[in-house]
């Protein structure tokens, strides 16, 4: 938890909340989605996701387009600006982690290499 908190501080845009960043990362990873799908993926209530999407849209980080099959719904997609911001944020976090990793011993690095696939699997369960 401590490492996660410290990583969250390695953001490029401090005006975005961790939840907003998470929604953008989900759109980056999974592609366009309806607000309802995003709410399920982010484990928030649909009205909360509607507010989050509206804030991200106001910041020009997402766009809403009509759903191709159901005109009552919209599909949310990240903008190129959001993609560039996410890439820069990822680069900044990776550089910070690499700096920390330089302080580890070879044995500690080997343990991390072995644990990485398990941690990745846990993240997607």
Image: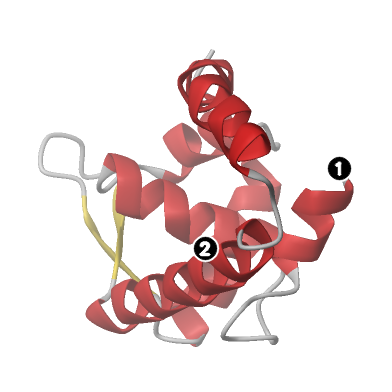
The residue positioned 52% from the left and 54% from the top of the image is: 23
The residue positioned 57% from the left and 22% from the top of the image is: 115
Number of the front mark, 1 or 2: 1
Check the image and report above or below for 51 versus 9: above
Reading the chain from its start, which is encountered first: label 1 or label 2? Answer: 1
Q: Residue 72 appears at what percent x and percent y?
A: 30, 43
Q: How many marks?
A: 2
Check the image and report above or below for 33 versus 121: below
Q: Is residue 5 left or right of residue 36?
A: right
Q: Is residue 70 left or right of residue 122?
A: left
Residue corresponding to mark 2? 53
Q: Is residue 99 left or right of residue 56?
A: right
Mark 2 element type: helix
- In-front residue for pair 95/32: 95
Q: Are marks 1 and 2 in contact (CB under 8 Å)?
A: no
Residue situated furthest right in the rendering: 2
- In-front residue for pair 57/3: 3
The residue positioned 53% from the left and 15% from the top of the image is: 118
Q: Residue 55 appears at what percent x and percent y?
A: 59, 75
Residue corresponding to mark 1? 1
Q: Residue 96 appears at what percent x and percent y?
A: 61, 72
Q: Quadrant of the C terminus?
A: top right
Q: Quadrant of the N terminus?
A: top right
Crowding at mark 2 (Cα within 10 Å: few <14, some 14-19, many 20+): many
Mark 1 element type: loop
Q: What is the quadrant of residue 62 in the picture?
A: bottom left
């Amino acid at each position: 938890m401590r490492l996660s908190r410290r990583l969250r501080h390695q953001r490029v845009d401090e005006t975005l909340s961790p939840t907003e960043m998470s929604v953008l990362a989900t759109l980056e990873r999974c592609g366009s989605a309806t607000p309802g799908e995003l709410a399920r993926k982010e484990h928030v209530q649909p009205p909360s996701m509607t507010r989050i999407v509206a804030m991200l849209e106001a910041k020009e980080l997402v766009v809403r387009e009509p759903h191709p099959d159901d005109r009552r719904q919209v599909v949310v997609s990240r903008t190129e600006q959001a993609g560039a911001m996410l890439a820069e944020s990822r680069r900044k976090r990776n550089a910070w982690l690499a700096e920390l990793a330089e302080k580890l011993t070879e044995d500690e690095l080997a343990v991390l290499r072995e644990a990485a696939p398990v941690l990745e699997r846990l993240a997607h369960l």
